[in-house]
Image (spheres, rainbow, N blue to C red):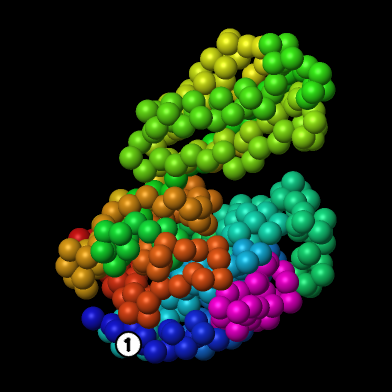
Amino acid sequence: VTAIDGERLLAGLRTLRSFGATGTGVVRPTFSADDMAARAWLRDRMTEAGLDSTIDGVGNVFGRSRRPGPALVLGSHSDTQPEGGWLDGAMGVMDAIEVARALGEDPTTADLAVDVAAWSDEEGTYSSCLGAKGFVSEVDPGILADENVDGESVADALARVGLTTVPHIRFEPDRHIGYLEAHIEQGPHLEETGKQIGVVTSIVGIRQAIVTFTGQQNHAGTTPMHRRSDAAVAMFRFGTLLQDRMAAAAGPTSVWTIGRVTVEPGAASIVPGHAEVAVQFRDQDDAVLERMAAAVAETADEIDRNGPVRVIARQGDAPIAPTVMDPDLLGHIADAAERRVPGGWVEMPSAAGHDPMVLSHHLPCAMLFIPSIGGVSHDFAEDSTEHDIVLGCQVLADAVVSILRSAVTPR
Ligand SMILES: [Zn+2]
């Protein structure tokens, strides 16, 4: 059984952390100077691991094994949120490089083909999962026109960093039999249940509803209470009623959030004439998402019927369907976890989005999680124990060997 080099993995992670380091966190948004410097460094690490390495036309760093297929693609993203932690994405990239290198150095596994990817812009500084999209399909004009908060488009950013004429590395259906990614959980489930490895069964789907409340704007002093049509009052009634309705409609791991509210005109001496809320909800099961969508619509209808404020619910951002992971690949990860930490792993959905949301439409995908201390992520305080980081990489390596061996010699 091939052993990964835990110290080498941790040393690499600490170096990657230095690109964009800010306190204990990292600020490395896609196509920033720090991001591009990190990508050049990652390309050299992939070369060092024995891979033919390049930065492609959408910013992906890709290291291709010189071994013939069947090959697995391993990876994650190396960009961060505007204020990110040091492990989100970075750990999966360094795990992938370590697995490729360790298997290549071991004569018993040196024949196995492991390709490594550090995807660009998973976090959506310009266009979420840009690199993964570029790997499986053409980057269409709509994506090239997506902009960051400063109004720079993907096309302009690619020109700025010198990638406009660089070819795209593309998915090879005859070679790539699957994609594996290790990631921090970014939530408290593993820590709360005392498990060390999460075998990710699915990535939750996301839906959004926008609910608008239209009343009558008026003077907050001269308008008697019985003559008011106060949009904010209707909005607050909707918010509290929705909490109960969603709890009844939801599954055990569903989450829902009213994350944005506006009240217009938003002055202390004016009865609000207009209000709007964004309701976002997530679950791994489309049927549950349907029930939650119905709960939003029914609650809006009820407040509307009671009057006097007009209430209308409509769809917000385009829905994202749940992503189901490949059961065969998952089985290999579960077996590997059981061998390393008997009883210390659990199957779970991912409540956060990841590149397999895009990749899984083209090749089988699977993910594993390690615990996040305090369940904290998208924050400078994000961290995991060195023990858990090394264990996760070893389980990934074990699963890779077992998947590639069974692909050559079916079980
Ligand atoms: Zn991530």
Q: Is residue 145 magenta?
A: no
Residue type at mark 1? Asp
Q: Could you tell me which residue is drawn at 77 percent across and 65 percent down?
A: 158
The reply to whether residue 40 is in sight is yes
Where is residue 174 drawn, in percent x and y?
46, 59
Residue at 22% across, 65% down: 344
Q: Can residue 110 be seen in this view?
A: no
Residue 121: x and y in percent read 63, 62
Residue where numbered disc 1 is placed: 106
- Helix, strand or loop at label 1? It is loop
Magenta-drawn stretch contains 19: yes
Residue displayed at 81% across by 67% down: 159
Left or right: residue 337 compared with residue 386: left
Residue 273 position within the rendered picture, expressed as x and y whole percent measured from the top left: 76, 23
In what quadrant of the picture does the C terminus appear?
Answer: bottom left
Q: In which quarter of the image is residue 200?
A: bottom left
Q: Is residue 341 above or below residue 204?
A: below
Decide if residue 376 is on the left or right side of residue 402: right
For image coordinates 41% across by 52% down, the residue present is: 350
Mark 1 CB lies closer than 8 A to ligand 1: no
* Badge 1: residue crowd in 10 Å (few <14, some 14–19, many ≥20): some
19 left or right of 406? right
**Which quarter of the figure is the N terminus placed in?**
bottom left
Instruction: Tell me if residue 391 comes above or below residue 105 in the rendering.
Output: above
Within the image, what quadrant is residue 316 found in? top right
* Viewer-side residue, 71 vs 385: 385
Give the x, y percent position of residue 348.
33, 52
Instruction: Give the camera-side residue of 250 and 290.
Output: 250
The residues colored magenta run 16-40
Q: In which quarter of the image is residue 192?
A: bottom left
